[in-house]
Image (cartoon, helix red, strand yellow):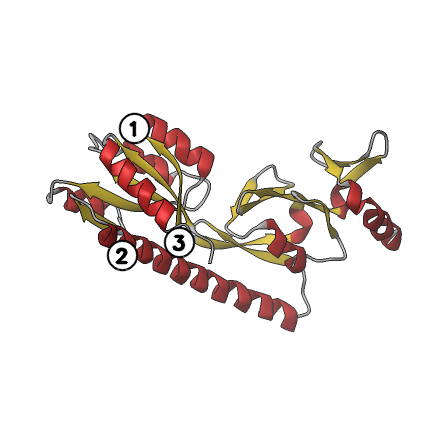
């Protein structure tokens, strides 16, 4: 199990110190990957770091922050609110908080909250994997390899493989770049798609990229290998993958 990546948004130094100490002592289950002292900086941090969990120890004047979360193009982070005011719990659970921690906060309360986040994440992934596996079984039964099921935000989308130009790694996520100009982000990492995508048309040219051979416009061998794709994007072929790529192209010619 990979640790939960968390950020802290708090104006209280003590809260940040407690959570950082908890992260250091419990690195197997949680890592603090950033912190901010205000909503503006916190919003920027969330978009840059894509955390699994946000600890919120701050007073909100409106719901703009939560509206921003709903518009993210990746899975909405879980929320744990921290406050000295019991009444603030109402606002916390209104915004689907996983837990509400009343100050003074202790390690036992934090670890219970983190395990609730882990449990919720496992349940969501289990549900998505069940749905995706069901779709894959149906595809196999019909001997169809035309679509790939992608877990995207809180839903699953079926994407025609012919419309995928390339896939790129974005941390623990995968971004599908499609021929209609849209991008779809999956909660699975790129490595998982090397076995899911049709291996007669898709090749992993680089640690960060899988391309669809049907969308290659030109291959340049000057100063390394580069593939120009149908949307104008040029991607490098990693040096250690060039021989396999050559063999793959020849097999398909």
Name which of mark 3 and mark 2 comes first in the sequence: 3
* Residue holding disc 3: 29
Horizontal and vertical percent position of residue 142 = 65, 71
* Residue 112 numbered tag: 2
* Residue 49 location, quadrant: top left
* Residue holding disc 1: 37
Residue toward you, 66 or 104: 104
Q: Residue at x 76, y 47 (%)?
A: 214
Mark 1 neighbour density, 10 Å: few (under 14) some (14–19) many (20 or more)? some
Q: Residue at x 53, y 47 (%)?
A: 172
Horizontal and vertical percent position of residue 225 = 81, 36
* Residue 14 location, quadrant: top left
Where disc 2 sits, the SS reads helix
Whether residues under marks 2 and 1 lie with C-beta atoms below 8 angstroms apart, the answer is no
- Rounded to the nearest angstrom, the CA distance separating label 3 from label 2 is 12 Å
Closer mark to the observer between disc 1 and disc 3:
3
- Can residue 101 be seen at all in this image of the molecule? yes
Residue toward you, 115 or 159: 115
Horizontal and vertical percent position of residue 183 = 56, 40
Q: Residue at x 32, y 43 (%)?
A: 21
- Rounded to the nearest angstrom, the CA distance separating label 2 from label 1 is 24 Å
- Can residue 229 be seen at all in this image of the molecule? no
Name which of mark 1 and mark 3 comes first in the sequence: 3
Where disc 3 sits, the SS reads loop
């Amino acid at each position: 199990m990979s640790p939960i990546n968390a950020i802290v948004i708090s104006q209280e130094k003590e809260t940040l110190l407690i959570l950082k100490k908890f992260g250091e002592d419990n690195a197997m289950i949680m890592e603090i990957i950033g912190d901010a002292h205000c909503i503006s900086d916190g919003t920027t941090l969330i978009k840059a770091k894509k955390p699994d969990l946000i600890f919120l120890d701050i007073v909100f004047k409106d719901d703009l922050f939560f509206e921003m979360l709903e518009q993210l193009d990746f899975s909405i982070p879980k929320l744990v609110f921290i406050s000295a005011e019991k009444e603030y719990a109402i606002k916390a659970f209104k915004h689907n908080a996983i837990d509400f921690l009343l100050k003074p906060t202790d390690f036992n309360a934090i670890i219970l909250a983190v395990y609730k986040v882990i449990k919720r994440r496992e349940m969501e992934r289990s549900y998505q994997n069940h749905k995706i596996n069901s779709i894959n079984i149906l595809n196999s039964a019909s001997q169809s390899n035309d679509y790939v099921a992608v877990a995207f935000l809180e839903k699953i989308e079926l994407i025609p493989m012919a419309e995928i130009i390339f896939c790129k790694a974005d941390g623990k996520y995968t971004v599908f770049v499609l021929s209609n100009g849209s991008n779809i982000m999956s909660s699975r990492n790129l490595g998982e798609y090397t076995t899911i995508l049709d291996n007669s048309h898709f090749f992993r040219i680089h640690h960060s990229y899988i391309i669809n051979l049907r969308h290659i416009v030109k291959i340049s061998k000057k100063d390394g290998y580069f593939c120009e794709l149908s949307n104008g994007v040029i991607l490098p072929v990693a040096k250690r993958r060039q021989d396999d790529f050559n063999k793959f192209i020849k097999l398909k010619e």
